[in-house]
Image: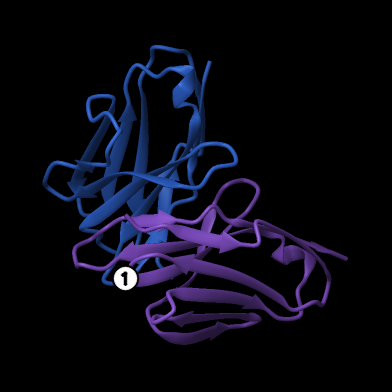
Chain colours: A purple, B blue
Amino acid sequence: KNEVEQSPQNLTAQEGEFITINCSYSVGISALHWLQQHPGGGIVSLFMLSSGKKKHGRLIATINIQEKHSSLHITASHPRDSAVYICAVGNSGGGADGLTFGKGTHLIIQP
Amino acid sequence: GAVVSQHPSRVICKSGTSVKIECRSLDFQATTMFWYRQFPKQSLMLMATSNEGSKATYEQGVEKDKFLINHASLTLSTLTVTSAHPEDSSFYICSARGRSEQFFGPGTRLTVL
């Protein structure tokens, strides 16, 4: 079973700062997801990637398959970015596997 | 983007009762739906994988007779928590798999008194 580690667990930053959240996993994957969970619990899928880099607005996600590592970056952070960011991986081997989740990074952006 | 809905969003019930949670894919057909559970301050954990028209596959440690899953159509899966107990209180989230991505529902918070 895949082990998914996220760092940091908690992160408090000032508005405008560049934010990086890291995710490492232990075995090969079919895809990696970055998710955003708000205090009410609802989850929004930010990115799904299996190689390279994706960008959406102020969010950038990268993945290094060889190193089994992914990063989520937030540029020009804003208080509304405050949420829990979760890394999740789908295991390789085909099939419609459910995801394995990291414990999440609790991000607070202060004005 | 694709939308997945869950109903109800919040439910409070007495111990011993059964609770049904619906998960619907609103604008796409999902041959596979997943049910996850999240206890406070813990990560999401996969409970079961539900394929349309067949029996669900449960993860180790999840009681199939307690958590009944029905996936009768390509747009609807239901999770029934039978004889719920306080330890079943949790946040239940479904996701639906489209062609290549998973889309998450907003979740259902279950509180069993």
- Work out whether A78 lies above or below A50: above
Residue appearing at x 26%, y 68% in the figure: A92
Q: Identify the subunit bearing mark 1.
A: A
Q: Amino acid at mark 1?
A: Gly
Compared across the picture, whether B37 is left or right of B61 comes to right
Residue appearing at x 32%, y 70% in the figure: A29
Residue sticking out furthest to the bottom: A52
- Work out whether A58 lies above or below B42: below
Q: Position of residue B32 (x, y in %)?
A: 23, 56
Q: Position of residue A39 (x, y in %)?
A: 65, 48
Residue appearing at x 46%, y 36% in the figure: B8
Q: Position of residue B69 (x, y in %)?
A: 24, 37
Residue receiving disc 1: A28
Nearer to us in this view, B48 or A52:
A52
Nearer to us in this view, B75 or B16:
B16
| Residue A86 in view (yes/no) | no
| Residue B65 in view (yes/no) | yes
Compared across the picture, whether B78 is left or right of A82 comes to left
Nearer to us in this view, A93 or A76:
A93
Quadrant where the N terminus of chain A is found in the figure? bottom left
